[in-house]
Image: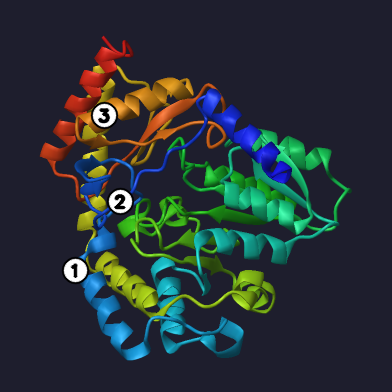
Amino acid sequence: MKKFDWIQSEIKNMKANGLYKTIRTIQSAQGAWLMVDGKRVLNFCSNNYLGLANHPKLVAAAREIALKYGVGPAAVRTIAGTLDLHLELEKRMSVFKKVDSVITFQSGFAANLGTIQALVGKEDVIFSDELNHASIIDGCRLSGARIARYSHSNPNNLEEVIKENEGTYRRALIITDGVFSMDGDIAPLDELFKVANVHDILLMVDDAHGEGVLGKGGRGIVDHFNLHGKVDIEIGTFSKAFGVVGGAVAGNPIIIDWLRQNGRPFLFSSAATAPDVAACLAAIDLLESSTELVDRLWENTHYFKSEMSHLGFDMGQSATPIIPVMLGEASLAQEFSTELFNLGIFGTPIWFPTVPKGKARIRVMISATHSHEDLDLGLEGFAKVGKGLGIIH
């Protein structure tokens, strides 16, 4: 039918330009090793930083609570969907994050959308890091506020952009990722706070890749910089280091109360399921009881980065367990990924529009569940493919 012609044409162009994504199928629980398309492979793709996605304590907690509460919430939080478990999770997270109040959402993406829309509108401005996550970008667009981008992780440029826009808005909001998911670098949150404080502007950080990774025992970027009580809004997710699914907003009780009244995903989308919430609570138990998993994650990260550096790979500005192996063109990244897979190593290629054109990469995600033998196997594979494709010598 003609009404689909433009879509078919666009897909054809994507394939011709090497931009079409072929999605592999996972056939096992998450872990250091996966079954992917019928093959057992070493996993370097998942956000399962601490190995909690298949941890026995989380699985047991979800199973037990499913028998008591069932599997579906059957309502939004404001009608008949708020369980005592939701309130317990919010209380436990406020203690874990050392904040006054927390509200949970169905995902980190939903938390960003709901928070930004509730805080700013058409008469307002958002000062946004140019490399912020898609969920922040979408939230900014949906809010209707004017978007003023500042140079990546550049507090001085943020200051300049704020001054350029003085007197042109009703309210303002500064937003940054905490850990940038494609490059693995850490936002200079302490310096951004100083700018926000001088201009009396709300400061929001998306800590999706910082929770469970940065700070004492994985308490996140605010703990990492010792900025408790100074950052107005912390967005988090339970789908990465926590190994489950869901989102959270931590911060000032006034803001959290406002989100309970105006956060659209909270108001209009069904609540998180009881098994998911129970698993999140079990994850907090583990993180509060020991720093072992976080410590092991960082030990693995330092080891792998050091060895990759010795091999001669370009890993950009990464300062976290997110390790971009920079390759440049999408076709090269895809070929590199295929060769890795043939060796039993699962490393997904990432290219435009997820990252800018010419900056395609294999993004390695290190986990606490990787053994040194796993990492050595991965290093051996990267070395073989890198030399075979002429990327290293």
| Quadrant placement of the C terminus | top left
Q: Of circles 1 and 3, which is in front?
A: 3
Q: CA distance from mark 2 to mark 1?
A: 20 Å
Q: What is the spatial separation of the Cα atoms under label 2 and label 3, in whole angstroms?
A: 17 Å
When asked about the image quadrant of residue 204, the answer is: bottom right
Frontmost of labels 2 and 3 is 2
Image height of 345 relative to 88, above or below: above
- Amino acid type assigned to the residue bearing label 2 in the image: Ile
User: Can you identify the residue that label 1 sits on?
Assistant: 56
Front residue of 216 and 93: 93
Q: Residue furthest right?
A: 167
Under circle 1, the secondary element is helix
Residue drawn 61% across the image and 70% down it: 265
Q: Residues within 10 Å of mark 2 (few under 14, many from 20)?
A: few
Residue 224 in the figure: left or right of residue 171:
left
Estimate the x, y position of residue 329 in percent, counting from the top left: 47, 20
Question: Which amino acid does the dot numbered 1 rest on?
Answer: Pro
The numbered disc on residue 219 is none
Q: Indicate the secondary structure of the residue bearing disc 3.
A: helix
Looking at the picture, tell me which residue is in the foreground, 376 or 294.
376
Identify the residue at horizontal 33%, vertical 29% (top origin): 337
Q: Please say if 135 is above or below 289.
A: above
Q: CA distance from mark 1 to mark 3?
A: 30 Å
Question: In the rendered view, does 207 fall on the left or right side of 63?
Answer: right
**x and y, in percent, of residue 303 in the image:** 21, 34
Residue 26: mark in rendering: 2
